[in-house]
Amino acid sequence: MTDIVDRTYRDIKSMRVRGALNIAISASRTLREVITSDAKNTPQLLKKLKRAGKKLKSARPTAISLPNAINYILYIADKNSHLELDEFRKKLLVDIDKFIDEQKSALDRIAEIGSNLIKKKDIILTHCNSDTVDTLIKRAWDDGKKIEVVCTETRPRYQGHITARELSSYGIPTTLIVDSAAHLIMKELDIDKVIVGADTIYASGDMINKIGTSQIALCAKELDIDFIVAAESIKFSPLSLLGSMVEIEERDPSEVIKPGKLPRVKILNPAFDITSADYIDVFATEFGVIPPEAVYSLLRERFGWELEI
Ligand code: RUB
């Protein structure tokens, strides 16, 4: 059983499985596997589940969706720990499947809601690769919006190539630019909207996404371009209500430059940055379109349970 947990841990850490929603779903599916594994009784299975959850949570530190999903599953497990093993298993499998289905429906709902924010012939700029943004853009295209998309390449891991490939093969006119061309291209192509995903959203309305997002938000503010964040509520951080913050992942310098090429130079490789709520116009969530100031009340209403654990 540790095999599957170790494999998922490695896949997430190495970014074979990446994107905030995908890693949360992948960890949930792995905990589902743990539930079907050998155990003598409920306390033993619960212990296994908690050990697996702890390991999976440590795979990547910045996307709150990962601990949110794991904490939710451990919360239901704790609540049902009075059940006999067979009943406990049955109940948890049903609840995890429901939870995963809800994440998929949230994605579809955001696409539907987000598409309404897009006008015919809009030129949209996006950064990195977000399944949520891709799904939203494809939905707008299907709704006949005749949009164009500009993707930043997203150094050092080039997730922008994934976005560009995916949207262009869907038939959407797509342009790829280097990250540092964002400001110039926003002006020259008269970009209408920036739409990005999120890894973590704080109660303050500040949000964390791929490194470079905050620079793009600054440019959008300066040029008066709408800045939209498309994110499922699983990316909201309940513990930020208590002031808790996530760690910004610092990845290996070899992602930036071949080891030894600049021997006397220190290489920094932060993978995410924080965009202030001041630069965000709206969040497109499965509960509707909300301004950054409304994140606080959404968190209190929907995620009070997490503050109990
Ligand atoms: C991915 C990234 C994405 C968010 C949202 O970073 O920053 O914008 O995770 O993605 P990485 P999604 O490539 O380092 O995982 O909408 O798919 O959850």
Image (cartoon, grey):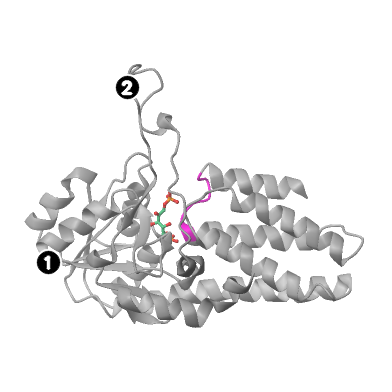
User: Which residue position holds label 2?
Assistant: 265
Q: Find out whether residue 237 is within the magenta segment.
A: no
Point 55% across, 76% down: residue: 102
Q: Which residues are magenta?
A: 15-20
Q: Could you say which disc has been placed on residue 224 in the image? A: 1
The foreground one among 99 and 141 is 99
Q: Secondary structure at mark 1?
A: loop
Point 18% across, 50% down: residue: 182
Point 52% across, 45% down: residue: 16
- Indicate the position of residue 231 as horizontal and vertical percent values: 40, 68
- The reply to whether residue 174 is in sight is no
Against 207, residue 9 (above or below) is above
The foreground one among 69 and 305 is 305
Q: Amino acid at mark 2?
A: Val
Q: Quadrant of residue 264?
A: top left
Q: Is residue 175 left or right of residue 70?
A: left
Secondary structure mostly seen in magenta is loop
- Indicate the position of residue 145 as horizontal and vertical percent values: 23, 75
